[in-house]
Amino acid sequence: MIGPEERNFAKYTMSVTVRLTTVRAYRIRRFEQFGLLKPARTEAGQRLYSDMDIELIREIVMLGKEGINLRGIKVILAMRRGQRE
C-alpha cells in the first residue's frame, strides 16, 4: 500500500502523465492555468506530477464528462476539500 507521502512525491514528467491518464498535455496545462492542478517544478521549470496529481487529473476528466465546466469543477473540488474558492 502506498502511503500519503509517496502519493505526494512528484515523479512523473508530462509525457509519462499523458500516458498514465490518456489526457493530452494541452488539457493538463489548461487545468493548471485554471487553478485546478499545481504540479511541482524542477529548477529548470519542468512539471512533475505525483500519484495524487494523476488521480486529480482523472477526477477532473470524469467531472468534465458529466458535463461540468472547469469553473464548476473548481467549485466542486474546493467543496470536497472543505475550502472556499
Image (cartoon, helix red, strand yellow):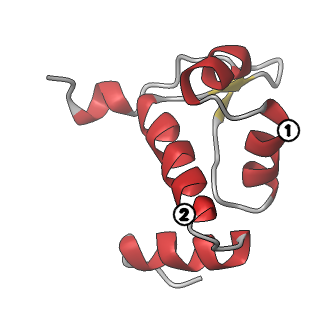
| 15 sits left or right of 16 in the view | right
Q: Secondary structure at mark 2?
A: helix
Image coords of residue 85 (percent x, y): 59, 82
The answer to which of 14 and 58 lies nearer the viewer is: 58
Q: Is residue 31 above or below residue 49?
A: below
Residue denoted by label 1: 26
Task: Name the amino acid type tagged 2.
Answer: Leu
Give residue 36's mark.
Answer: none
Q: Residue furthest left?
A: 1
Give residue 33's quadrant in the image: bottom right
Image coords of residue 28 (percent x, y): 73, 41
Quarter placement of the N terminus = top left
Tell me which residue sits at (29%, 31%) in the image: 5
Q: Is residue 13 above or below residue 79?
A: above
Give residue 83's quadrant in the image: bottom left
Residue denoted by label 2: 63
| 80 sits left or right of 29 in the view | left
Image coords of residue 43 (percent x, y): 76, 20
Tell me which residue sits at (67%, 17%) in the image: 13
